Amino acid sequence: MTQVDDPHTRPPGHDGGGPPIALGGAAGIAPGDVVHEILAIAHLGTIEEVWQRTAAALRRYGFVRVNYGFTRFRTGLGIGDPDDAFFLSTHALEKVKAFHETGLYLRSADYRWVRENVGACPWDWVTRERAAGRLSPEEERTMDQLGAGRGRAGMTISFAVTLPRSKGAMGLAAPKGTSQDEVNALWRAQGEAIEALCNFAHLKLSQLPMPVPSGQLSDRQREILEWIADGKSLQDVCVLTGLSLSSVEKHLRRARDLLGVETTPHAVAKASFLNQLFARNSAG
């Protein structure tokens, strides 16, 4: 799992304390400006740039904490190997680790909602579901274990599945002291624009090169995998790169280790899923 703690996306004075900022209204974004933000995001070339721009735009609506998760390796009801899931957060890294390393979220009713639905869900949904007796015993236990960490108001957005085995979602947290009724009122007024912004950011993030879980593929490793993806044999790769067979095999072995796979075809597939092939982390 990739966890990004980006201090540049934290609003000054809103690291969990202080008075709440306004939701919507003067703090919001005019409809024409939403188009401007989406267009600006479209021209960005790195995950860091897209994330910072998106978090800053959401902050203008009043959401001071943002979490984003995406996987291309979903299996059954789970997200696959957590190390292969991509996660961004404006929370402190320590809090993110503590939350996800327990695995509690994957047993929660919130995760079930994300898995089964597309759209936006208010954070008091799970409380209402429990009061109506619609949570399983495990979901109730998980809710109790999550405890005080659920105190804020906010919204969860579950994105449509665009590719088999993929799933993405984003959580938007209002400042402490903000009621869910206030967030719901904002959503009635501007939720469509906010959801459009988040959906576009998700689509942009999901098509940019994602980090390799165990490190970074070298240019040579990526080049060799790209030639193999093009259908070239190892002998062809030696001719095309000017490398010996032993050197090509060494680069492939290192690439398999970094990607956490056992075979070269699996390495090509996984690197492709991570958008690491035929792509570069730069704009244009």
Image: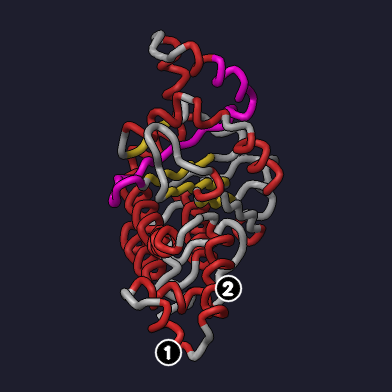
Look at the image and say whether residue 281 sits in the magenta stretch: no
10 Å crowding of disc 2: few (<14), some (14-19), many (20+): few
Q: Report x, y in % for residue 194.
A: 37, 49
Q: Which residue is at the front of the view, 8 or 185?
A: 8
The amino acid beneath tag 2 is Lys
Query: In what element is the residue under mark 2?
Result: helix
- The quadrant the C terminus occupies is bottom left
Quick check: 34 above or below 97?
below
Total numbered labels placed on residues in the image: 2
Is 88 displayed left or right of 37 in the figure? right
Look at the image and say whether residue 154 sits in the magenta stretch: yes
Q: Specify which label sits upstream in the sequence, 2 or 1.
A: 1
Residue drawn where x is 57% and y is 56% of the image = 213
Given contact means CB atoms under 8 Å apart, are the residues at marks 2 and 1 in contact?
Answer: no
The answer to whether residue 279 of the structure is visible from this angle is yes
Q: Report x, y in % for residue 11.
A: 62, 54
Quick check: 163 above or below 48?
above
10 Å crowding of disc 1: few (<14), some (14-19), many (20+): few
Instruction: Measure the alpha-carbon separation of dots 2 and 1.
Output: 16 Å
The amino acid beneath tag 1 is Val
Q: Which residue is mark 2?
A: 250
Q: Which coloring applies here?
A: secondary structure
Quick check: 240 above or below 46?
below
Is 219 displayed left or right of 120 in the figure? right
Q: Which residue is mark 1?
A: 239
Q: In this picture, which residue range is highlighted in magenta?
A: 141-165
